[in-house]
Image: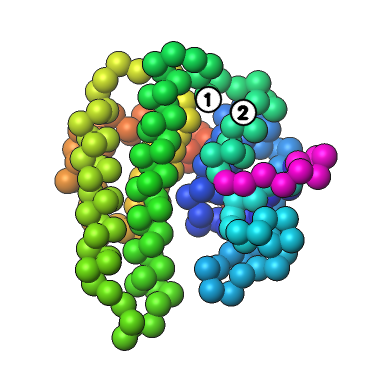
Amino acid sequence: MKLFFSPNSPYVRKVLVTAQEVGLGSKIELLDAAASPINRDARIVAHNPLGKVPTLVTDEGLALYDSRVICEYINAQGQGTLFPANGAHRWQALAWQALADGLLDAALLVRYENNARPEALRWSDWTDGQMDKIHCCLKELERQGHQPRGGFDIGHLTVGCSLWYMDLRFPDMKWRERYPSLAEWIAPYMQRASMQMAWQLPA
């Protein structure tokens, strides 16, 4: 398998953590990519018309995107248990994945607004709206965190990757101080070996 890769993409991280969890980390070749909403990378577009990372090319040549599809594919290939098969546990795990992905969508829009858009064209009301989404997601995760759950699943994994991205790009938010219950219950999951790994392209 080949993965178009960016080390700071939280969605790429989801895929790589999934691969580590199911024992397929060494089966994925990382491909250099320069995904951008402005200057689109033709190497990615050749496989994914959206031009985004992560894009996975399977051993059979099938291109898969986005992270939700790729994570489920890798989990199935590795016969993993990150996606509960049925029942309330399955729907809760998928709902948490959607919530954390939504948090990431908002965070990336803030990132693009503040770093890609020319300063004279930036819209503070837009940024404020996206930041409100982020805080609403964090409040909901704080509220839900102590509900009885099964083991580590795609919901925990995605929440952990979203908070990793908040640490990376929004350290001044100090989310652990603002949402102490969330910080407490997510800590053991974020300390898993797979979640602690750092990735880079081969030299």
163 to the left or right of 68 = left
Please name the predominant secondary structure of the magenta segment in the image: loop
Q: Residue at x 70, y 68 (%)?
A: 42
Q: Quadrant of the N terminus?
A: top right
Q: Name the residue: 55% across, 43% down.
A: 67
* Residue at the extreme top: 87
Judging from the image, the colouring scheme is: rainbow
- Asked if the stretch drawn in magenta spans residue 193, the answer is no
Q: Amino acid at mark 1?
A: Leu
Circles 1 and 2: CB atoms closer than 8 Å = yes
Instruction: Specify whether 136 is left or right of 60.
Output: left
Q: Earlier in the sequence, mark 1 or mark 2?
A: 2
Amino acid type shown at disc 2? Asn
Q: Which residues are magenta?
A: 58-66
Residue 156 percent across, percent down from the top left = 41, 31
| Residue 111 rendering spot, x and y as whole percentages | 38, 65
CA distance for labels 1 and 2: 7 Å
Residue 19: give x, y in percent of width and height. Answer: 62, 35
Q: Name the residue tied to disc 2.
A: 75
Relative vertical location of residue 64 with respect to residue 152 in this rendering, above or below? below
Work out whether residue 90 or residue 81 is closer to the camera in this orientation and state it.
90
Tell me the residue that label 1 is attached to: 82
Q: Secondary structure at mark 1?
A: loop
Say if 11 sits above or below 19 in the image: below
- Asked whether residue 176 is in view, the answer is no
Of residues 139 and 26, the one nearer the viewer is 139
Question: Residue 178 bears which disc, if any?
Answer: none
Q: Assign the C terminus to one quadrant of the image.
A: bottom right
Specify whether residue 112 is in view: yes
Badge count: 2
